[in-house]
Structures are given as C-alpha cells and as structure tokens.
C-alpha cells in the first residue's frame, strides 16, 4: 500500500513539474484571468487598432474609454488615380513664399496662367509656415497641405477666386463605373461666416493654361477650359462656424450616368462651386490627404 501511495505521489509531482516547465504564461496554461482584454466589449486592449464603422477595416484606435475612435484614412492607400495626395513631394522650399505656390507640389498646379492682378492661385503650407494675421494652423498637424479661399458669390472681382489641379495618373473614362473621393479639410480663416461650397470637377486638359478669370463666375468653372471639357463631380458643404480641426469629406460619382468629356478627364479641379448659395460666404480652407478609388 505504501508503495502505491509513494508511486502516486511521484507521478503527481512529476506531472506538476512538467506543467510548470511547459507554461510560459497564463494563456498557455489555460488561465485567462490576467490576460482579459482591457475592453471586453471590443475584445481589444487600449491602444489597439480597431474597426470604427463595421466595414472590417482597422481604421481606428481603442481609447481609454473603450471606444473605437476612427482615424483619417492614410493617404498611402489612395494614390491609385490622384498623385501626391498628401502634398509631401515638392520641388523647392514650401516656406520660401506663403502665397500662390501650389505648383511646388508635384502633380499639382494652378488653374490659370497667373495670380497677379486678378484671380489668385492656391497656396502650399506646412505646420512651420508663417500664416497671415487671423489665420490658424489646421489640426492635427499633417505635414504639407494646400490652402485656398472658397467664396460662393457672383462678385465682379475675382480676387478670392482660387483653385488647384491634380493631374491623374491615368484618365478616367466614361462608362467605367462608380468612383469615390475623400479628402480632409479644415477652416483656417473666415471673413464672411456663412456656408460655403467646395466644387470638385473632372477636366480634360492639355496644353496651355487659360487666362485669369474676370469675375467669380466669368467664365464658369465648366467653361474655363472650353465647352464640354469639364464636369461637376460633386460639392462639399462647409457650414458656417466650422473649426480648424480636419474633417473628412467624401463624394461619389457615376461615370455611367454623368455627361462627361468624350475622352474622359485627365485632371481633378478643386475650387469653389459654380452653384452659388443664397448667402454670401468666404472661408480660407486647408486641404490634405486626397483619396480617389474605383468601387
């Protein structure tokens, strides 16, 4: 009997020793108490990546309140059609001039030939740029970004008519399906605090830039590059009182139903919408992190 008890103890101690040596941690040994996630509702820990909107894309971060907070879409995922979507590829010094220098950003450019004496060109800035009085930097800081006045009016003077072009890596042709664009925008300065609208256009362009426009609506955005060469893809409303915190805007367009240039369009034009709002408004808006994809 003693031998049986002794053998049982020996077997038991040997089994316990094997278990101790084979267990790195609680999870390996079958214990989960010390490894429960910080946020059981999300099955994740604070600081982990998470899906903020149910589309299975890990586009957010778990905060200290166990909430999945969405983040702005990284531009690296969205460079298929538009180029240099985050304005980081430049030639020259972004801060050599703080005015009318959008052409420093590779694949971006002005809408017309000159910014002198008439309509202006878009600007290229970063977080270290010296801003005009009354302006504030957009937040969160994101490196280089573009900025321009967006004014919705029928004013005779084009002084606040600004815009920029992006040359697409490949033309978007008619009847090729649905496309989705998104970008971040923030208000850096306001002179007339009413709603404004950003206009996004597709333009078939090659050759020489047109002369400066002579008013806010002459020529119309749709006629800047000749009849039939431009199409309105969508508008983004920026409400009165908007802040300098980046907001992500998105729009979609269907090339199967749009009346497009026959050869498609080679550029994306960003400027004020030619469809005027009832109340005059004017804001200086920062733009960054463009994304254009085919669904």
Image (tube, rainbow, N blue to C red):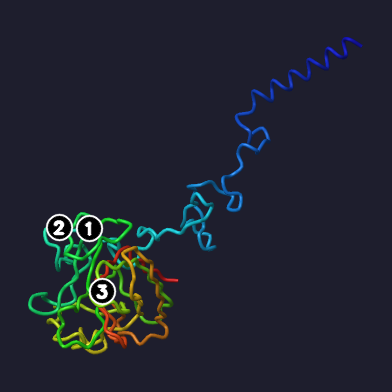
Is 12 above or below relative to 29? above
Report the front residue among 241 and 204: 241
Q: Residue furthest left?
A: 117
Give the CA separation, mark 2 to mark 3: 22 Å
In the image, which disc is placed on residue 95? 2
Secondary structure of residue under mark 3: strand
Secondary structure of residue under mark 1: loop
Give the residue at mark 3: 283
Give the CA separation, mark 3 to mark 1: 18 Å
- What residue is rendered at 53% in x and 60% in y? 56
Give the CA separation, mark 2 to mark 1: 8 Å
Is 223 above or below relative to 7? below
Report the front residue among 5 and 176: 5
* Image location of residue 17, percent across then percent down: 69, 20
Q: Quadrant of the C terminus?
A: bottom left
* Image location of residue 217, percent across then percent down: 21, 87
Q: Earlier in the sequence, mark 2 or mark 1?
A: 2
Mark 1 is surrounded, within 10 Å at the Cα level, by few (under 14), some (14 to 19) or many (20 or more) other residues, namely: many
Give the residue at mark 1: 126
């Amino acid at each position: 009997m003693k031998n049986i008890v002794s053998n049982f103890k020996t077997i038991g101690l040997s089994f316990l020793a094997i278990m101790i040596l084979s267990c790195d941690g609680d999870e390996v040994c079958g214990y989960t108490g010390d490894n429960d996630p910080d946020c059981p509702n999300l099955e994740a820990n604070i600081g982990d990546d998470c899906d903020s909107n149910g589309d299975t894309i890990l586009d957010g971060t778990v905060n200290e309140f166990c909430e999945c907070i969405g983040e702005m879409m990284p531009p690296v995922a969205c460079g298929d059609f538009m180029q240099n979507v985050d304005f980081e590829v430049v030639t020259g010094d972004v801060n050599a001039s703080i005015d009318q220098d959008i052409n420093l950003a590779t694949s971006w450019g002005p809408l017309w030939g000159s910014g002198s004496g008439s309509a202006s060109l878009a600007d290229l800035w970063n977080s270290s740029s010296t801003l005009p009085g009354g302006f504030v930097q957009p937040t969160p800081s994101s490196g280089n970004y573009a900025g321009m006045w967006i004014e919705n009016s029928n004013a005779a003077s084009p002084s606040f008519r600004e815009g920029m072009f992006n040359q697409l890596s490949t033309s978007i042709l008619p009847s090729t399906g649905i496309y989705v664009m998104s970008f971040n925008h923030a208000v850096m300065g306001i002179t007339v605090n009413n709603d404004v609208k950003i206009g996004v256009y597709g333009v078939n362009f090659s050759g020489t830039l047109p002369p400066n426009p002579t008013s806010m609506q002459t020529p119309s955005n749709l006629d800047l590059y000749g009849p039939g060469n431009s199409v309105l893809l969508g508008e983004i409303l920026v409400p009165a009182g908007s802040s300098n915190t980046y907001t992500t805007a998105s729009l979609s367009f269907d090339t199967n139903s749009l009346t497009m240039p026959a050869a498609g369009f080679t550029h994306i034009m960003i400027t004020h919408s030619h469809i005027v709002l009832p109340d005059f408004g004017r804001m200086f808006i920062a733009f960054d992190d463009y994304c254009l994809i085919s669904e």
